[in-house]
Image (tube, rainbow, N blue to C red):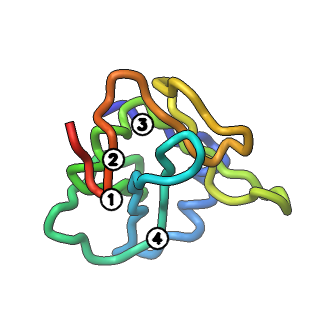
């Protein structure tokens, strides 16, 4: 799995994450382009989750359905007042919406009703 964490995001996460914490990244249906990334700092993986990327003490964790959409993901960080926080882009993106908050990927399954379908 090819996930890139840019320098600003890596620095912020290294400062923010405590020893047992990780970043949970998911993909859900939403936005005008069809899919959106979600992320949270968490402890304790759920039964369907596994570590998909590690760099230093930073662990990216995701569930099996979301993993299909994470290859090519780039995680950056912005401290802008508007739309600040972790920023997600993907080299495999087919389309994005005007605000940049949702996307669709060419050749990937669709998420319907909150779960992935082929």
- Earlier sequence position, callout 1 versus callout 3: 3
Q: Residue at x 39, y 56 (%)?
A: 26
Would you say the residues marked 2 and 1 are in contact, meaning their CB atoms lie under 8 Å apart?
A: yes
Residue 111 numbered tag: 2
Would you say the residues marked 2 and 4 are in contact, meaning their CB atoms lie under 8 Å apart?
A: no
Find disc 3 in the rendering and name its residue.
3
Q: Nearer the viewer, mark 3 or mark 2?
A: 2
Find disc 1 in the rendering and name its residue.
114
- Earlier sequence position, callout 1 versus callout 4: 4
Would you say the residues marked 3 and 4 are in contact, meaning their CB atoms lie under 8 Å apart?
A: no
Q: Position of residue 110 (x, y in %)?
A: 33, 39
Q: CA distance from mark 1 to mark 3?
A: 23 Å
Q: CA distance from mark 2 to mark 1?
A: 6 Å
Residue 41 numbered tag: 4
Would you say the residues marked 1 and 3 are in contact, meaning their CB atoms lie under 8 Å apart?
A: no
92 or 15: nearer the eye? 92
Q: Quadrant of residue 33?
A: top right
Q: CA distance from mark 3 to mark 2?
A: 21 Å
Q: Nearer the viewer, mark 2 or mark 4?
A: 2
Q: Residue at x 63, y 59 (%)?
A: 12
């Amino acid at each position: 799995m090819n996930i890139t964490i840019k320098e600003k995001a890596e620095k912020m996460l290294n400062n923010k994450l405590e020893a047992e914490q990780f970043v949970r990244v998911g993909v859900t249906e939403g936005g005008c382009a069809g899919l959106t990334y979600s992320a949270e700092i968490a402890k304790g993986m759920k039964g369907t989750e596994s570590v998909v990327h590690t760099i230093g003490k930073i662990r990216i964790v995701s569930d099996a359905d979301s993993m299909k959409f994470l290859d090519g993901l780039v995680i950056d960080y912005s401290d802008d007042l508007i739309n600040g926080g972790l920023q997600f882009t993907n080299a495999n993106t087919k389309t994005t919406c005007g605000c940049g908050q949702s996307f669709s990927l060419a050749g990937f399954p669709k998420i319907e009703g909150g779960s992935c379908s082929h």
